[in-house]
């Protein structure tokens, strides 16, 4: 797949002064809620109004969206505010209805991107129509599956494309509803620099107080913009109440974000430098997480040895580990001395931890 500047024309032709802001409620609930939210958002940096009309819910019985009766409400938003509007489509009949109601941009939800049959069905329903399509990452961290969905739309003749990073499903994550796994988005950005990359911090965070922080990370990584769930009365929203912000809070977030200046050669250098530094920061915190996990296991082994009265230091095992790791490290371009040094200090720390158990 090749993605060129032509594929991001929908975004570039908007000539925005800041990264694109797509905002609006998780779900369209009533005409009054939709219109009131839209008029409030008109006073912010919002460029595109979003609202879910059909909601893919994890379990049946919850609110599954108002359905097609909500589409004229979005048409009214366009008429009254001049903002573009976008909604999620999950099958061919959604596509037909959305097009009939002048929706400007379509997005594909995370639970749809995982299914190539459905993605193909939606792409086929769009044949001959060139409307921008934004593809959310699949719920599982699978970059080829994400890109495969984009490719299906491109092959069907959709030239205006973009992707939305909304994080990946996990079990028992303390900090995130959906883990960002930034390295996947960084990889995607390196391979397809012209593909607009938009962050959805709402579904990553699952709570409103961490949205600013996660959004700043995306900005430092040179993302093209944001999709942020916004509701006039978040606590009483019919879906995703904990993560939605008010239009006023949204304004606070976009004001607090340190936004980069428009490009020049020097600024381009600064931007690249900043992006690489951010990548290093993310990798460094991953190293700490992994070391902490490793020491947690060392502790368990310490307990076992203690209960069976086995000696802590088993030097044969350690020289095995070090020689295996040196071999692996050297094959990846690291020096022998460096790998040895790191693993010696890991060993010392493991032994200390096991001694403390005694
Ligand atoms: C949404 O944007 O409201 C939504 C359902 O998102 P996702 O597909 O990312 O879960
Ligand atoms: Mn939502």
Image (cartoon, rainbow, N blue to C red):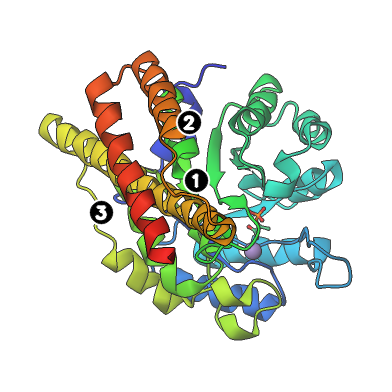
**Residue furthest out toward the left:** 266
- Report x, y in % for residue 9: 45, 32
Find numbered disc 3 in the image and state the secondary structure of the residue it sits on. loop
Q: Residue at x 49, y 59 (%)?
A: 201
The quadrant where ligand 2 appears is bottom right
- What residue is shown with label 3? 259
Mark 3 nearby-residue class (10 Å; few <14, some 14–19, many ≥20): some
Q: CA distance from mark 1 to mark 3?
A: 22 Å
Q: Earlier in the sequence, mark 1 or mark 3?
A: 1
- What residue is shown with label 1? 181
Q: Which quadrant of the view contains residue 358? A: bottom left
- What residue is shown with label 2? 188
- Above/below status of 307 relative to 323: below
- Above/below status of 160 relative to 256: above
- Report x, y in % for residue 146: 63, 34
Mark 3 CB near ligand 1 (8 Å cut):
no
Q: CA distance from mark 3 to mark 2?
A: 22 Å
In this view, the residue in front, 291 or 197, is 291
Find numbered disc 1 in the image and state the secondary structure of the residue it sits on. loop
Q: Is residue 268 left or right of residue 55?
A: left
Mark 3–mark 2 CB contact (< 8 Å): no
Q: Residue at x 44, y 65 (%)?
A: 357
- Above/below status of 37 relative to 12: below
Q: Nearer the viewer, mark 3 or mark 2?
A: 2
Q: Is residue 109 visible?
A: no
Q: Nearer the viewer, mark 2 or mark 1?
A: 1
**Residue furthest out toward the right:** 61
- Report x, y in % for residue 193: 40, 27
């Amino acid at each position: 797949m090749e993605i060129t500047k032509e594929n991001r024309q929908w975004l570039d032709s908007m000539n925005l002064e800041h990264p694109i802001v797509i905002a609006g409620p998780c779900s369209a609930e009533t005409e009054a809620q939709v219109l009131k939210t839209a008029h409030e958002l008109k006073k912010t940096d919002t460029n595109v109004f979003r609202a879910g009309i059909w909601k893919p819910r994890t379990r049946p019985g919850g609110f599954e969206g108002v359905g097609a009766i909500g589409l004229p409400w979005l048409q009214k938003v366009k008429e009254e505010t001049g903002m573009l509007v976008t909604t999620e489509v999950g099958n061919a009949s959604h596509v037909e209805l959305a097009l009939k109601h002048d929706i400007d941009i379509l997005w594909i939800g995370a639970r749809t991107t995982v299914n190539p049959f459905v993605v193909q069905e939606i792409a086929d329903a769009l044949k001959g129509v060139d409307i921008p399509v934004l593809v959310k990452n699949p719920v599982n961290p699978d970059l080829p599956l994400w890109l495969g969905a984009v490719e299906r739309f491109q092959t069907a003749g959709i030239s205006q494309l973009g992707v939305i990073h909304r994080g990946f499903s996990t079990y028992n994550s303390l900090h995130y509803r959906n883990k960002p796994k930034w390295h996947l988005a960084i990889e995607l950005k390196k391979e397809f620099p012209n593909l607009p990359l938009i962050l959805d911090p709402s579904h990553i965070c699952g709570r409103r107080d961490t949205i600013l922080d996660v959004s700043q990370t995306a900005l430092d990584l040179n993302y093209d913009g944001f999709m942020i769930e916004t509701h006039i009365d978040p606590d009483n929203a019919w879906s995703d109440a904990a993560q939605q912000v008010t239009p006023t809070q949204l304004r606070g977030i976009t004001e607090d974000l340190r936004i980069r200046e428009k490009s020049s050669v020097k600024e381009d250098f600064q931007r690249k430098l900043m992006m690489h530094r951010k990548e290093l920061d993310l990798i460094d915190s991953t190293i700490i997480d992994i070391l902490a996990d490793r020491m947690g296991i060392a502790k368990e082994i310490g307990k076992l040895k203690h209960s069976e009265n086995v000696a802590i230091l088993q030097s044969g095992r350690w020289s095995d580990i070090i020689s295996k790791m040196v071999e692996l490290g050297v094959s990846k371009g690291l020096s022998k001395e460096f790998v040895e040094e790191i693993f010696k200090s890991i060993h010392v720390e493991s032994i200390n931890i096991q001694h403390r158990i005694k």
